[in-house]
Image (cartoon, coloured by chain):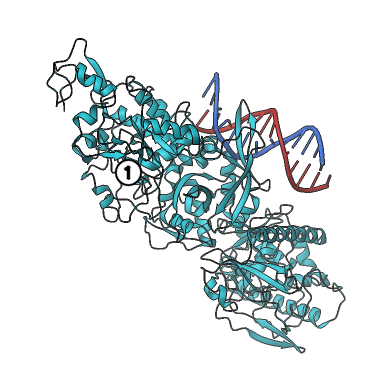
Chain colours: A cyan, B red, C blue
DNA sequence: GTGCTGCATGGGC
DNA sequence: GGCCCATGCAGCA
């Protein structure tokens, strides 16, 4: 610690023994921010002439050439810290050249340099304020800040946090690995060349955490991977040379990761950190405001809210950057609201983010903004604003196609990054399952995991794994990683919007229309259908339930040939396949045997973004139209849905009148197993709605078979029930008893394990009037049914809950009565639910047939 | 009737 | 109390 300038009688310059004049002349501002070097006349004059370093530090290290005029500038000490500017491409410029270039190339949105000079050395008081401005507050546009940070702060991963963001609980519970950091006491660096990490305990709020000391260079040396920085902090700069140390939880090293990661950008954080650093550093002895504003205000209105801090991961960066050497600057992220992900196609941008990172717009119409998605597709959005309460509301318009192509929905997160040096905007995303694995969002996350991605994989908190074709899911055994900020009280979904929260609760159900669900059904793996011949017609029957297949988009090529587009699980590129090609639930480019040229994820996508957009749009339209048509067609008959017991643990909750669209862009209505030459009961029928409908009196083979099999089914059920009743005689009878068909009906010997949906066809021939009556019972689940029902289990639970004995539904046809939701969690096993389920199972089974065209 | 556009409203921070 | 922003809604095409 040097002698306070005020206490020394000699010139502050240690190389000068001259006494200070009275009053002493002020030199540069000292690091503590309040004092100034008190100099003798000579040294003061040299300082004011900008020749101090030249005179006294000529043999010191840290001299650099101005990139413009070549003039040597000492960048190695605090004395001249304000007389040069760091340039984005690297190097420095003297004040004079920088002023010229700034005037010539001034771009408020994308500054070319960082100015470290004060307006005048004789106004050293200006420094902190200017630095703060540069860092993103005050009149200087926020958009200047990213470059500022980019240039100075090696930040390997995730968003920086201010010291007071870290408390004990955060360290232990919230902080993700590598999120840990410690602001560095920059004055220490300046003086002794070592990078000392300020112990977090030092901060006023009692935070505890990392306490390490590393040589200055070890910051980079300890990196697991090199960091692409345009300007490395090799030269200790003024206080803005804030750096962060990170620990890698796996090895405890300080370091940075990510080959293309540029330091984190949140502009206000620059101010945030700088201001607080000054404040905190002085907090021990001088608990005053150092940056000109109360500490509390550091989190004030000018802050980029934590929920917008980019939490982009290495993998995502890698995905975005691909193999290029481009540097990616994560800008911000936003969780999609219902309206963002809705049809309107408007993505509301956080105001601060929009103003900081997007081009400045003065007219509400804004301007078109090209954004590239993670797959490389380029989209053009209209970046604009609406006047709103004397403020602005920034929106991106026309995002629907992009959001649909990424299959995003409310709760998912879109991230915005900038690709340097191109300056291209990159839009990435994280699926909700990756972002919300905790708290109230937990359930939704689990659901998503359950449907679209692996769950319960080895917990590796430091990594992310893909959960679906394009999103990521956190492999977080504790369910805390990705939800760190969301667990805060003021989290986006925590309390920000009840409406959004409700929507997320709805995510417990996978919104899936019945037709879409059918379209996704595939024969079970290793299936060996038993073929039964009835009157010359072959019937396939499966022992196991079908599985969910890969959604595709059916299209017609110019030549009229039917094809389907399928998206690769790994690279999310769309590949073309024959329309009748059967896809597993997961499909990757490697399986594209039919098109060797595109059997690798590295192969380009055939579809242009425009074509894809059209395709998705047309798919949606078709789906919507079909839904409407189907609704109209079935409106009189549809009160409940068919039991899709084949969906294993899924349940469909029909919601009449509500057309869900979540998967409509992907779900195909293609007959999942409609194969040429197949003579099964469905394949001999024309697709739903396309052929003549069968009359109730129809005696064709199909109708007769259906009827006979239904009778058999009912007889079996009756017999089973009788047996059970005999066994459980004396037991309490359930409140609702399945009505049974006429016992005199003959049994169909071929009915071994047929689909319960066959039964529905029977209700139309008048033989199941009882069922029709039960269908209209006052069940609280009227209009719905629970696909979680596993018939066998139901039978165990309720002696009268025979669901028909069949567990496998042939995923034929598109005969869904209406759309429904697939529910992943069964209703609570209350009596009411059980009974309701029984009722639903029975009635629903009778209402839906795999031969929907039979009337 | 439907979808789009621009603004208004109001809850939450 | 002011600002942000999710969403509602009227007007229009």
Element type at mark 1: helix
In the rendering, at what x and y percent does residue A646 appear?
Answer: 61, 70
Q: Would you say residue A179 is visible in this rendering?
A: yes
* Quadrant in which residue A821 is drawn: bottom right
Residue at 43% from the left image edge and 49% from the top image edge: A482
Q: Would you say residue A592 is visible in this rendering?
A: no
Q: Quadrant of the N terminus of chain A?
A: top left
In-front residue for pair A85/A217: A85
Q: Indicate whether A227 appears above or below A358.
A: below
In-front residue for pair A113/A812: A113
Q: Which residue matches tag 1? A: A171
In the rendering, at what x and y percent does residue A490 appear?
Answer: 47, 36
Mark 1 belongs to chain: A
* Quadrant in which residue A297 is drawn: top left
In the rendering, at what x and y percent does residue A243 appear?
Answer: 31, 41
Residue at 27% from the left image edge and 49% from the top image edge: A254
* Quadrant in which residue A62 is drawn: top left
* Neighbour tally class for label 1: few under 14, some 14-19, many 20 plus, Cα within 10 Å: some
In the rendering, at what x and y percent does residue A611 appear?
Answer: 67, 61
Q: Indicate whether A609 appears above or below A135.
A: below
């Amino acid at each position: 610690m040097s002698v306070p300038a005020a206490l020394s009688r000699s010139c502050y310059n240690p190389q000068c023994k001259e006494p200070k004049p009275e009053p002493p002349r002020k030199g540069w501002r000292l690091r503590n921010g309040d004092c100034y070097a008190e100099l003798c006349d000579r040294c003061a004059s040299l300082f004011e002439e900008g020749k101090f370093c030249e005179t006294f530090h000529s043999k010191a290290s840290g001299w650099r050439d101005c990139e413009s005029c070549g003039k040597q500038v000492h960048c190695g000490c605090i004395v001249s810290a304000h007389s040069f500017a760091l340039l984005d491409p690297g190097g420095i410029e003297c004040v004079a050249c920088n002023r010229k270039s700034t005037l010539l190339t001034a771009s408020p949105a994308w500054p070319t340099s960082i100015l470290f000079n004060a307006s005048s050395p004789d106004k050293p008081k200006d420094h902190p304020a200017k630095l703060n401005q540069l860092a993103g507050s005050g009149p200087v546009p926020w958009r200047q800040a990213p470059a500022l940070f980019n240039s100075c702060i090696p930040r390997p991963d995730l968003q920086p946090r201010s010291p007071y963001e870290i408390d004990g609980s955060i360290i232990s519970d919230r902080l993700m690995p590598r999120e840990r950091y410690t602001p560095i006491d920059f004055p220490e660096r300046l003086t002794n060349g070592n990078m000392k990490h300020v112990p977090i305990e030092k901060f006023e709020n009692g935070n505890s955490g990392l306490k390490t000391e590393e040589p200055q260079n070890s910051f980079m040396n300890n990196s697991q991977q090199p960091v692409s920085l345009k300007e490395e902090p090799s030269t200790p700069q003024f206080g803005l040379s804030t750096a962060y140390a990170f620990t890698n939880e796996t090895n405890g090293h300080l370091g940075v990761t990510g080959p293309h990661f540029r330091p984190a950008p949140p502009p206000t954080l620059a101010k945030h950190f700088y201001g607080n650093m000054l404040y905190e550093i002085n907090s021990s002895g001088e608990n005053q405001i150092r940056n000109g504003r109360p500490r509390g205000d550091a989190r004030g209105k000018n802050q980029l809210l934590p929920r917008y801090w980019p939490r982009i991961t290495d993998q995502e960066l890698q995905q975005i950057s691909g193999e290029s050497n481009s540097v990616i600057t994560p800008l911000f992220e936003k969780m999609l609201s219902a309206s963002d992900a809705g049809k309107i196609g408007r993505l509301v941008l956080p105001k601060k983010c929009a103003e900081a990172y997007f081009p400045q717009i003065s007219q509400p119409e804004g301007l078109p903004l090209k954004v590239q998605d993670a797959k490389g597709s380029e989209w053009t959005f209209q970046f604009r604003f609406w006047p709103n309460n004397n403020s602005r509301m920034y929106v991106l318009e026309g995002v629907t196609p992009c959001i649909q192509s990424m299959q995003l929905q409310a709760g998912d997160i879109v991230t915005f990054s900038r690709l340097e040096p191109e300056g291209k905007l990159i839009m990435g995303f994280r699926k909700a399952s990756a972002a919300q694995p905790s708290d109230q969002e937990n359930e939704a996350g689990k659901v998503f995991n359950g449907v679209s991605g692996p769950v319960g994989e080895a917990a590796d908190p430091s990594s992310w794994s893909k959960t679906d074709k394009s999103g990521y899911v956190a492999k977080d055994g504790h369910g805390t990683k990705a939800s760190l900020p969301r667990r805060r009280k003021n989290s986006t979904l925590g309390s920000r919007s009840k409406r959004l929260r409700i929507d997320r609760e709805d995510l417990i159900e996978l919104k899936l229309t019945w037709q879409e669900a059918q379209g996704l059904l595939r024969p079970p793996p290793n299936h060996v259908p038993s073929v039964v011949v009835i009157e010359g017609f072959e019937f396939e029957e499966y022992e196991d339930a079908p599985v969910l297949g890969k959604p595709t988009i059916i299209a017609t090529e110019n030549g009229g040939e039917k094809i389907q587009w399928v998206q690769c699980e790994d690279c999310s590129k769309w590949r073309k396949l024959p329309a009748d090609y059967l896809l597993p639930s997961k499909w990757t480019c490697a399986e594209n045997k039919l098109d060797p040229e595109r059997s690798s994820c590295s192969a380009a996508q055939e579809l242009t973004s425009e074509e894809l957009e059209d395709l998705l749009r047309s798919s949606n339209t078709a789906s919507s139209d079909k839904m409407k048509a189907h609704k109209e067609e079935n409106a009189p008959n549809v009160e409940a849905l068919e039991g899709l017991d084949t969906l294993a643990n899924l349940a469909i909750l029909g919601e009449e009148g509500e057309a869900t669209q979540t998967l409509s862009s992907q779900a195909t209505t293609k007959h999942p197993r409609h194969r040429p030459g197949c003579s099964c009961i469905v394949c001999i029928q024309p697709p739903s709605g396309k052929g003549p409908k069968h009359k109730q009196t129809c005696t064709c083979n199909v109708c007769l078979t259906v009827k006979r099999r239904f009778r058999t089914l009912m007889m079996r059920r009756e017999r089973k029930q009788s047996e059970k009743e005999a066994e459980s005689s004396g037991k309490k009878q359930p409140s609702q008893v399945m009505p049974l068909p006429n016992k005199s009906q003959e049994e169909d010997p071929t009915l071994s394990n047929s689909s319960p949906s066959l039964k529905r066809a029977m209700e139309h021939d008048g033989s199941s009037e009882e069922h029709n009556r039960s269908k209209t019972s006052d069940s609280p689940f009227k209009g719905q049914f629970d696909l979680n029902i596993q018939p066998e289990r139901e039978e165990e639970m309720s002696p009268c809950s025979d669901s028909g004995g069949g567990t496998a539904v042939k995923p034929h046809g598109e005969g869904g009565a209406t759309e429904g939701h697939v529910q992943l969690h069964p209703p609570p096993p209350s009596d009411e639910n059980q009974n309701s389920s029984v009722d639903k199972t029975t009635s629903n089974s009778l209402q839906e047939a795999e031969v929907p065209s039979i009337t």
